[in-house]
Image (cartoon, rainbow, N blue to C red):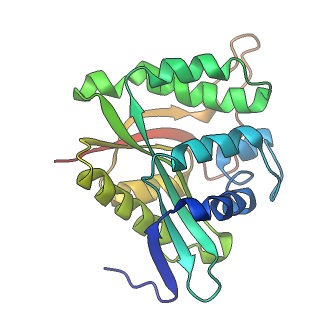
Amino acid sequence: MASFPGIDFSPIPEARYDDVIKHLRDNFFADEPLNCSVRLCQPGEPHAELEEHALSTLRDRLSWMAMDTDTGQVVGVALNGVSRRGDLAEAQERLAAVSDDKFRTIFGLLYGVNRRLDLFAAHGVDQIFECRILSVDSRYRGRGLARRLLQLSEGTARERGFKLLKEDATGLFSQRVAESLGLQTACQVRYCDYTAEDTGEVVFHTPQPHDCLKIMVKVLD
């Protein structure tokens, strides 16, 4: 197992939720490929809908963080939640009421692809363990933190009796991390093929090397 000197991994307690949100503002909200493509927000800026998405996931109490033991700073997170039958339909209904067009566009893609895929029927399950956000501080990347966070998340999924682990991997690096732990692509959407119905124009011009969305899953024995 890889060694991580100076890094401590632990479940995320409620007392660190604000620190997690700050980490996401500084390292994920603007940099995630789809967010970056539509310029959803700038680094360090708050974003109400993204923060509520993160907080609602944290409340499932299945998430993990990496902390710098010298500074106490949150330097990586895996935010994990439970998806149940019917949740996607309800989420799409709520999305229609969101005022942020860019947020609606991003989650319209994610919800739509997942609903058509219907992993619940495909795998005969009523609930799915989802890694919804996998993020590492830019200063700590390349050290295997993301892989360890996803590995710990898988352990939690197994301990809680989930039969399926899923990640909506929007970028190449998260896709490589997922593949290294045995997740397989259940569905792939190339961004250059995803076009607006009314104009036919490509919706997401993601930065290279991120060229597709992969819905990735692992059956947990």
Q: In which image quadrant can residue 52 be found?
A: top right
Q: Residue at x 49, y 71 (%)?
A: 145
Q: Position of residue 84 (x, y in %)?
A: 38, 29
Is 145 placed above or below 103 here?
below
Query: Quadrant location of the N terminus?
Result: bottom left
> Which of 116 and 69 lies nearest the eye of the viewer?
69
The structure residue drawn at horizontal position 64% and vertical position 76%, both measured from the top left corner, is: 73
Q: Give the left or right position of residue 115, taking residue 141 as reference.
A: left
User: Where residue 65 sits: x, y (%)?
Assistant: 51, 66
Residue at the image point whose x is 58% and y is 72% from the top: 141
- Which residue corresponds to the image point at 53% horizontal and 50% vertical from the top-left? 58
* Residue 60 vs residue 211, the one in the foreground: 60
Identify whether 115 is placed above or below 58: above
Query: Residue 216's quadrant in the figure?
Result: top left
In this view, 213 is above or below 113 = below
Residue 189 is situated, as x and y percent measured from the top left of the image, at 51, 32
Can residue 117 be spotted in the picture? Answer: yes
In the rendered image, residue 180, in percent from the top left (x then y), is placed at 35, 60
Along the line of sight, which residue is nearer the eye, 120 or 61?
61
Q: Quick one: 159 or 123, which is closer to the camera?
A: 159
Residue 211 in view in this figure: no
Name of the residue lying farthest toward the front? 15
* Number of callouts: 0
Left or right? Give the position of 17 relative to 189: right
Which residue occupies the extreme left position in the image?
Answer: 221
